[in-house]
Amino acid sequence: MVYEKNIIRKDNLVIGFVFILLGSSFYNTVDAWISSFIMLFFFNFIMDSYQKDYPFSEYFNAALLLSLISIYYPNTIYFAFLFMISGVNFSNNNWRVIFTILLGLITPYIFYFVFAYVSGSSFNIPDFSAFNLFDFSNLTLDYSPLNIWVGTLFLISLVSIIELFRWLYKKSIRSRKSFLTIFWYFVVSLLIAIYSGGDYFYFALTPLAVIIGNYFVYSKSRKIANILFVILVISSFYYKHLIAYNV
């Protein structure tokens, strides 16, 4: 997607490899993997709204997918903030677009209500206010493989974000607007994860992989980028090895 949209112009496998590295270190379920995969299409529809004055079909499809995911992961509904962010970024916000988004969000629940009524089953609306603040007090400062991996990921993420904003003005207008949307996608997903528990951190991997991949591809400091890449690979494989063998 990022290559077809000309977000990253160098066609390579770095982003996919980074995503696999990050995702392999999570105890994710099949539901989380499928939901994260659907989120790719959700974000793709948002990116397709670029330079469209009336992106009705794009926003409706994105809202429809987001609503479906919210049935299993209720707090993902707050990714709807991306509609407002992209609307401002792509300059295509208007009341008809907002109505289209709302229609897409409620459509699955209308079908769910009709199905529950016809089948005589109960209609249970997900609890969209079930916040479970991530407990940072449980984190310990030691040299465990998990802390080494988290520390490495935090360092690379910080460097990647700084590098992104340093070189953002040199990118094309479309790439610039797209990366701003991706950055806010990461911010929103991180906030949702912090206030919803560890299960939601998996949804932050997609935008983070794009941001980190952009750094590894375009960084002018090749030695530093290569060293950080090797450290990320080693720490990820080592931590994944411990998970696989329950060490």
Image: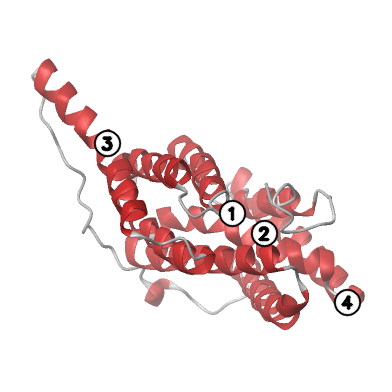
Residue at 52% from the left image edge and 68% from the top image edge: 89
What's under tag 3, amino acid-wise?
A: Thr
Disc 4 element: loop
Q: Earlier in the sequence, mark 3 or mark 4?
A: 3
Q: Where residue 135 sits in the image (x, y, percent)?
A: 36, 71
What's under tag 4, amino acid-wise?
A: Lys
Alpha-carbon neighbours of circle 3 within 10 Å: few (<14), some, or many (≥20)? some
Q: Which-is-in-front pick, marks 3 and 2?
A: 3
Image marks 2 and 1: residues in contact by CB distance under 8 Å: yes
Which label is found at residue 107?
A: 3
Q: Earlier in the sequence, mark 4 or mark 2?
A: 2
Dot 2 corresponds to which residue? 210
Query: Which one is nearer the viewer's eye here, 214 or 157?
Result: 214
Dot 4 corresponds to which residue? 220
Disc 1 element: helix
Residue at 15% from the left image edge and 30% from the top image edge: 113
